[in-house]
Amino acid sequence: MRLSRLLLAGLCAAPLPVRPSLLAQTAPAAYQLTEAMVPMRDGVKLYTRILAPRVVDAPLPLLLVRTPYGIDFQTPQSVAAGWTFMAGGPEQVSRRGYIHVFQDVRGKFRSEGEFVMLRPLRTNRADSTQVDESTDAYDTIAWLLRHVPQHNGRVGMTGVSYPGWLTVQAMLDPHPALKAASPQASPADMWLGDDFRHNGAFRLSYGFEYATMMESGKDVQQFRMDTYDSFDWYLRLGPLSNVNAQHLKGRIPTWNDFVAHPDYDAFWKRQSVTPRLNRVDVPTLHVAGWWDQEDFYGPITIYRALEQHDRAQSNRLVVGPWNHGGWMRGSGESLGPIQFGQPTAQWFRDSVMAPFFAAHLHDAPDPRLPEALIFEAGSNVWKRYDSWPVKTGVSPRSLYLREGSALAWEPPTQRARAFDSYVSDPAKPVPYRPRPIPMTYGAGSTWSTWLTDDQRFAHLRPDVLSWTLPALEQDLTIAGDLTVTLHAATTGTDADWVVKLIDVYPDTGMQPPRMNGYQFMVANEVFRGRYRTSFEKPAPIVPGTPQPYTIDLHTQAYTFRKGHRVMIQVQSSWFPLIDRNPQTFVPNIFEAKASDFRAATQQIHRSAAHPSRIVLPVVTHIRP
């Protein structure tokens, strides 16, 4: 089944409409559509749609979006109805407008060539015959400058997720005319922390459904399951070796890459963009969402890598209370049942993104954006910081897992072995959200908001452990990086460790009533135990021996309000978001046999010798 581009939840599709107050005051006929097959340096031609105002008072900048999701729906009508927020801000800037350019990447839809998922960077940048997404962006800009009339010589690029990654690629060896870029929710490393793997744990439902969607043809085609509950479908699938044996038959290149490269080898490292981010040539606005279900690791990592080289102070970060691409649609007043009390997405588009492009492409006034513009959920306020993570006014404090399912600021004193335990059974994995779980894409999908699901469905399961701090007597605000150290043991030889940081709402007085006692997941991550000493060379776990696992919960700005409680949950499966760990070490889990999947007893230790804890970046004074 072919998906609507506007409904794609994964590696977000082309930009979405915004509120009517930002729409152009002219009729759709005011835009002229020109189609072109733009030649690249190797002769491959890429299908491109150029939408320019018919009446131009002065030369206009070009605004380029490159995408694998198709561009046929980008018309004079759609541009007039949805994309002129780029010319928002001061009224005089809005009237100036943009020449909008959309392009299918190689091998997708009407473009020639072969589609390669996240095409690796060329090996020799001095070789003019080699191509990658960076050269395709460069060649496209060069062609536009020669063939599109009435431009002012300046180009901006933006995009969400895959188009955001394409924007980052264009920044690596940028055309001199590229004067502003806003990569949004771009992946940085697909093995370490973005779409396909997190710390080596394979993101099964997303990886399978996205790869089949993108590589079953030149267009976008959804895989068909014979059951509504994808949890049931993936469990009946059995070992991952059945994917090719029963369904794909080797036809999906990315799935074959998953199988051939289970560890962090040269294949994945070539795709990682981080090592190439060694200079800031283009003013850049990075955008991320705290509850992005696909790419939160990427934009933060890309921003930080570039920040080390930002001598001109033109590298900026915005993080808001959004899911994947949520800042580009709707008002942003809420996410799932969580309310933010203000139109965060609308404000971002009006007051941040539009002025950023206007300043660099139209010589509009400098919007004076801070280094980091951060939304602090819980208190629901925007904060302006001169660095991220914050360098002053924040103190790391350890919150320890203690006896009696309690959290405490004081470390454990018990000298003897002390732990809590549970049995993890791969035949009965913990679902990552309440069942039934629809497919990632398509009608009825709740993928876009699952990170806001009430975690009470998992609380008190026998294979999930929870520790809780007493109700707070005053607000607790965190701003910065979160790290967990688990001292854990298993009777198996491999294990997954899933950690969730949860805000437990008060049991009474909340509106609507279903928010009483709500368990809202503030941060989370998974770590595959075989990679505890090396991502490149996995090794079995010694059974029964407590070992430390350091798990990065990334970064967060959040206020746990007075009367709320802080909770930590730990489990060893998160299905089918994460594939089932056999809990028996095998060289390649994609080749594991059914007999390799065995139940194991997991221990989370909490003694003086083996203290398990989370380190929170606690704000120590009120910021203006």
Image: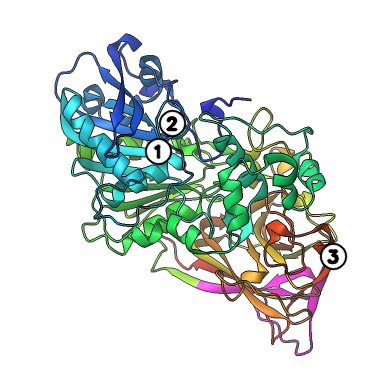
Q: On screen, 289 above or below 427? A: above
Tell me which numbered mark, 3 or 1, is placed earlier along the sequence: 1
Mark-to-mark CA distance, 3 and 1: 44 Å
Residue 472 in magenta?
no
Residue 175, quarter of picture: top left
Q: How is the image coloured?
A: rainbow
Residue displayed at 52% across by 27% down: 6
Q: Mark 2 points at which residue?
A: 15
Mark-to-mark CA distance, 1 and 2: 7 Å
Pick the quarter of the image with the N terminus.
top right
Label annotation for residue 159: 1
Residue 354: x and y in percent read 31, 35
Q: Nearer the viewer, residue 509 or 617?
A: 617
Q: How crowded is mark 1: few (under 14 residues within 10 Å), some or many (20 or more)?
A: many
Q: Name the residue under label 3.
A: 599
Residue displayed at 55% across by 25% down: 4
Residue 193: x and y in percent read 54, 57
Range of magenta residues = 396-424
Q: Residues within 10 Å of mark 2 (few under 14, many from 20)?
A: some
Residue 63: x and y in percent read 29, 32
Pick the quarter of the image with the C terminus.
bottom left
Tell us which disc is closer to us: 3 or 2. Answer: 3
Residue 527, quarter of picture: bottom right
Q: On screen, 122 above or below 601? A: above
Marks 1,2: beta carbons within 8 A: yes
Looking at numbered disc 2 in the image, what kind of residue is underneath it?
Pro
